[in-house]
Image (spheres, rainbow, N blue to C red):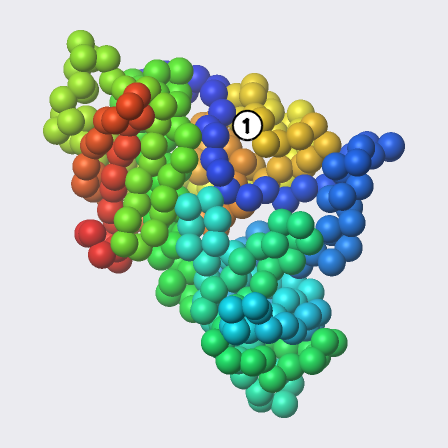
C-alpha cells in the first residue's frame, strides 16, 4: 500500500481570491475592500455555474477604454474568461450584445489594484457601460489549458509517490502552456538516490502519472478561511497569503496536499488522457521537470 503523503504545502504562484474577516481591517484590508467595489466576479471559479466547463456567460459592461498603446479593452461585472497567471495562459473569445453586436478579445488580464479583469482586443468595443452582453470563450483552448495545468499539479503527487516528497524537492512554480510545460522544484535528487539518473526519474514519473490517470481521481477547489487553507495545505501557506484572506485551495486528487491556485482544472484525472516527461534540468539547486500531454505542441 502507498503510504500517506507528507502534508507539506505546495507554493503556487497562481492568483487567489480574497475576502476580509477582521472586524477592524488593516490598511491593506481596506485597500482590498476598495478594490472589490469595482472587481470583476470570477465566474470561471464558480463550480455551480459550470466552472472550467462554462463557455458562455451573461454579464454587464462596466468599463470601455483605449489603452496608451492604442489597443482597446473592456471590463465586465463578471466573466468566465481566465486572466493569464499562475503559469496558465488567458482565455480568448467574444463579447456579444443584445442587438447582435460582437467584439473579439485576444487576452484577459487581472488588474490587481482594482480586481478588474480587462478583456483586450484589437478593435474598439461597440458597447457602452451598462450594456447587457454575453461573453463566450474558446472552449477547446480552455479545456486544453485546464488539462495541462492539472497535469502539473498531478506531477507533484507523482513525485510524492515516487519517494520524492516536498521535504526533499519543494515545488515552487510552473508553466502550463500548450507550447511549453514544466514544474520547478527547489533542491535536487541525492546522487545516491535510485532516481538520481534523469532517465530513471522520467520513467518512474511516467509510470506514476499513468496510475493517477487510470485511477481517475476527482479534483476539488474551494475558498477557505486562512486556518482551513493552512490545514488543507499541510500546515503552512505561502507568505503572500495573509491571515485575513480566504484563498482558493485546489486538491488535484483526494487525500493529497492542496495548494492555493486560481487556475482552471479538469474534474477528473482521466481527462488528462496521457502524460510523458520530456526533460529534467538541474541548475543552481533548482530541478525543472518538463512534461507534455496530448494536444500540446511538444507531444
User: Which image quadrant is residue 214 in?
Assistant: top left
Question: Percent x, y for residue 192?
Answer: 18, 9
Q: Nearer the viewer, residue 92 or 226?
A: 92
Question: Percent x, y for residue 12?
Answer: 47, 35
Relative to 90, residue 257 above or below: above
Kindly give the residue lying farthest to the front in the view shown. Answer: 68
Question: Percent x, y for residue 258?
Answer: 50, 31
> Residue at left 47%, top 20%?
8
Kindly identify which residue carries mark 1. Answer: 238
> Residue at left 55%, top 44%?
15
> Residue at left 56%, top 21%?
236
SS of the residue at dot 1?
loop
> Residue at left 26%, top 57%?
295
Q: Nearer the viewer, residue 123 or 249?
A: 123
Whether residue 134 appears in this view of the structure is yes
Kindly give the residue lying farthest to the right in the view shown. Answer: 24
Quadrant occupied by the N terminus: top left
Kindly give the residue lying farthest to the top in the view shown. Answer: 192
Kindly give the residue lying farthest to the bottom in the view shown. Answer: 99
Relative to 224, residue 98 above or below: below
User: Which image quadrant is residue 241 in?
Assistant: top right
Q: Residue 90 vs residue 238: left or right?
A: left
Amino acid at each position: 500500500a502507498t503510504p500517506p503523503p507528507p502534508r507539506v504545502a505546495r507554493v503556487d504562484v497562481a492568483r487567489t481570491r480574497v475576502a476580509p474577516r477582521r472586524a477592524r481591517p488593516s490598511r491593506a484590508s481596506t485597500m482590498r475592500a476598495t478594490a472589490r467595489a469595482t472587481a470583476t466576479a470570477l465566474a470561471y471559479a464558480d463550480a455551480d455555474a459550470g466552472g472550467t466547463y462554462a463557455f458562455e456567460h451573461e454579464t454587464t459592461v462596466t468599463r470601455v477604454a483605449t489603452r496608451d498603446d492604442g489597443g482597446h479593452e473592456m471590463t465586465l461585472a463578471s466573466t468566465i474568461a481566465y486572466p493569464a497567471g499562475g503559469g496558465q495562459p488567458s482565455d480568448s473569445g467574444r463579447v456579444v450584445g443584445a442587438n447582435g453586436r460582437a467584439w473579439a478579445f485576444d487576452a484577459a488580464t487581472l488588474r490587481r489594484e482594482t480586481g478588474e479583469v480587462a478583456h483586450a482586443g484589437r478593435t474598439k468595443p461597440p458597447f457602452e457601460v451598462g450594456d447587457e452582453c454575453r461573453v463566450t470563450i474558446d472552449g477547446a483552448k480552455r479545456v486544453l489549458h485546464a488539462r495541462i495545468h492539472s497535469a502539473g499539479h498531478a506531477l507533484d503527487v507523482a513525485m510524492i509517490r515516487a519517494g520524492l516528497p516536498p521535504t526533499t524537492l519543494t515545488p515552487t512554480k510552473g508553466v502550463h502552456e500548450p507550447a511549453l510545460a514544466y514544474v520547478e522544484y527547489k533542491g535536487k535528487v541525492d546522487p545516491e538516490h535510485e532516481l538520481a539518473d534523469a532517465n530513471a526519474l522520467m520513467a518512474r514519473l511516467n509510470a506514476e502519472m499513468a496510475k493517477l490517470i487510470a485511477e481517475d481521481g476527482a479534483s476539488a477547489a474551494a475558498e477557505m478561511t486562512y486556518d482551513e487553507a493552512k490545514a488543507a495545505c499541510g500546515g503552512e501557506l505561502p507568505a503572500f497569503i495573509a491571515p485575513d484572506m480566504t484563498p482558493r485551495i485546489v486538491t488535484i486528487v483526494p487525500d493529497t496536499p492542496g495548494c492555493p491556485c486560481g487556475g482552471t482544472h479538469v474534474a477528473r484525472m482521466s481527462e488528462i488522457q496521457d502524460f510523458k516527461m520530456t526533460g529534467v534540468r538541474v541548475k543552481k539547486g533548482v530541478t525543472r521537470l518538463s512534461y507534455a500531454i496530448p494536444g500540446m505542441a511538444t507531444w
